Image (cartoon, rainbow, N blue to C red):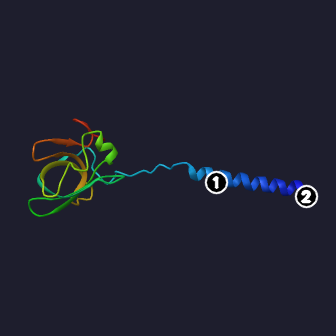
Amino acid sequence: MKSTTLRRGLLGCAIALAGAATMSVPGSAHHSTAMFAWGEEVALSDMTVLRWEWTNPHTFLYTRDADGNRWAFEGMSPNHLIRYGWSRRSLAPGQVIDLTHYPLRDGRNGGFNVTVTRPDGTILNQFGEGGSRQ
């Protein structure tokens, strides 16, 4: 009787430890890019920056075109963009920029931002110089 109780106790502890160990392993999240037409780069000119969100896991750029239409663009993470010369101060509300993006497949105004050309001519690329991710 004593050994059965001991075995049950040890089994219970082993299960609890296994559960705790499983929960302590960091999970990996997957963010789908299926909504974007990757590789179909589209250029837009004279876009006014409304808001630039430097957030994880992705940055977001909100703009308005010359006709007053609003656009939204997802970008890479701040950690990734820092490696290619971007910062939280790369864009400011009111700046007029040119950009390229992979459009949304459903036709809405937006997509995945690829490059931004700032008013001084500086080009910021999400994937490094001349690079793209497909």
Residue at (14% x, 41% y) in the render: 122
Residue 89 pos. (x, y %):
22, 50
Residue at (14% x, 63% y) in the render: 69
Q: Do callouts 1 and 2 mark residues in contact (Cβ within 8 Å)? A: no
For numbered disc 2, what is the local secondary structure?
loop
Amino acid carrying label 2: it is Met
Q: Nearer the viewer, residue 132 or 3?
A: 3
Residue 44 seen in the current view: no
Residue 66 image-quadrant placement = bottom left
Residue 90 pos. (x, y %):
20, 48
Q: Is residue 109 left or right of 56 when viewed as pictured?
A: left
Residue 100 pos. (x, y %):
18, 47
Residue 115 seen in the current view: yes
Residue 60 pos. (x, y %):
27, 55
Q: Is residue 99 left or right of 131 when viewed as pictured?
A: left
Q: Which residue is mark 2?
A: 1
Quarter placement of the C terminus:
top left
Q: Is residue 10 left or right of 61 when viewed as pictured?
A: right
For numbered disc 1, what is the local secondary structure?
helix
Q: Is residue 122 left or right of 19 when viewed as pictured?
A: left
Q: Which residue is mark 1?
A: 19
Badge 2: how crowded within 10 Å, few (<14), some, or many (20+)?
few
Q: Nearer the viewer, residue 120 or 61?
A: 120
Quarter placement of the N terminus:
bottom right
**N-terminal-most mark, 1 or 2:** 2
Q: CA distance from mark 1 to mark 2?
A: 27 Å
